[in-house]
Amino acid sequence: MVIGIKYCGGCNPVYDRARRVRRFMEENPAHEYKGALNEQTYDYWMVVCGCSRRCAKTNGLIARKNVFVVWDEESFHQMEQELKRAEGKKILKLYDKVVLSKRITGEDTTAFSNLTGDENRIHRDVEVARKAGFDRPIIPGMFVDSLVSSVMGTKLPGDGTLYLEHNARFMRPVYPGDTIEVTVSFYSYEERKDCYVGSFRGTCKNQKGDRVLVVNSRQMMRKELFCVKVEREETDDDKFRTV
């Protein structure tokens, strides 16, 4: 992508605009950055304002995709997200979290058993379930575990992630009719040349708030599909002050 950069007049800047733009360019090196030529058409325009008044003119700026007016960390972040999406990448940040819920039925057990060939009668025979120590038939543990895998594969990290390791601890039985809340969080990662290896934790709770399953997994996330955003510590020059 080619990005044109235009600055406001700088009458009352509350932060070092040039430094913040340099940081943006360093953190997003895949793009070509050009100085302000109003008659030029670029993929994106970055209009850098020095304060919340945002008085820079955008008239005449032609962009194939979008014109961004940036003046604080949130607006810089929004532009960065747009660029990553245009590259086909998903941005992840440490401590990202996703929560989803599902009510589990006996039909789910039947479908899971038909698919996997798991004919264990503890899942459908009351007497067998009681002799095993349960009040009634229980949902297959691997079906509950697969709910966590589903969230990791579609939401966090998301499309394109690859399992490297998965460790599950089954804590309580799940019964037909239970509603399971699945929480997945991203808590650490290792950066490699072509990918990130992320560590994720999954927790399943029933409608009573009791934990029924805890999962720890490691996922490979190729850099063609994912970008892990590192929140670095701000310096005094980076901080934005209220105007």
Image (spheres, rainbow, N blue to C red):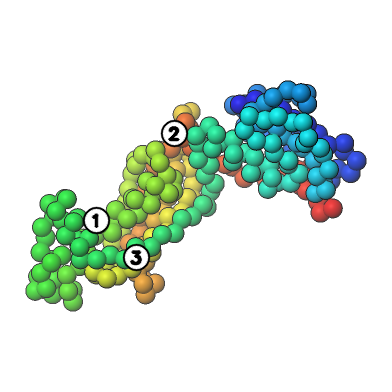
Residue that appears at 50% across and 36% down = 89
Q: Secondary structure at mark 2?
A: strand
Position above or below: 159 against 208: above
Alpha carbon separation for disc pair 3 and 2: 30 Å
Mark 1–mark 2 CB contact (< 8 Å): no
Residue type marked 2 = Arg
Outermost residue to the front: 60
Residue visible at 74% across and 46% down?
Answer: 72
Can residue 225 be seen at all in this image of the molecule? yes
- Circle 1 residues within 10 Å: few <14, some 14–19, many ≥20: few
- Marks 1 and 3 close (CB-CB < 8 Å): no
Q: CA distance from mark 1 to mark 3?
A: 14 Å
Residue found at the very far right of the displayed protein: 11
How far across and how far down the image is residue 18, in percent? 79, 33
**Within 10 Å of the Cα at label 2, are there few (<14), some (14-19), or many (20+) other Cα atoms?**
some
Work out whether mark 1 precedes mark 3 in sequence or the reverse, and give the earlier one: 1
Q: Position of residue 153 (x, y in %)?
A: 37, 46
134 relative to 187, above or below: below
Foreground: 35 or 42?
42
In terms of depth relative to the viewer, which is nearer, 194 or 85?
Answer: 85
Q: Which mark is residue 180?
A: 3
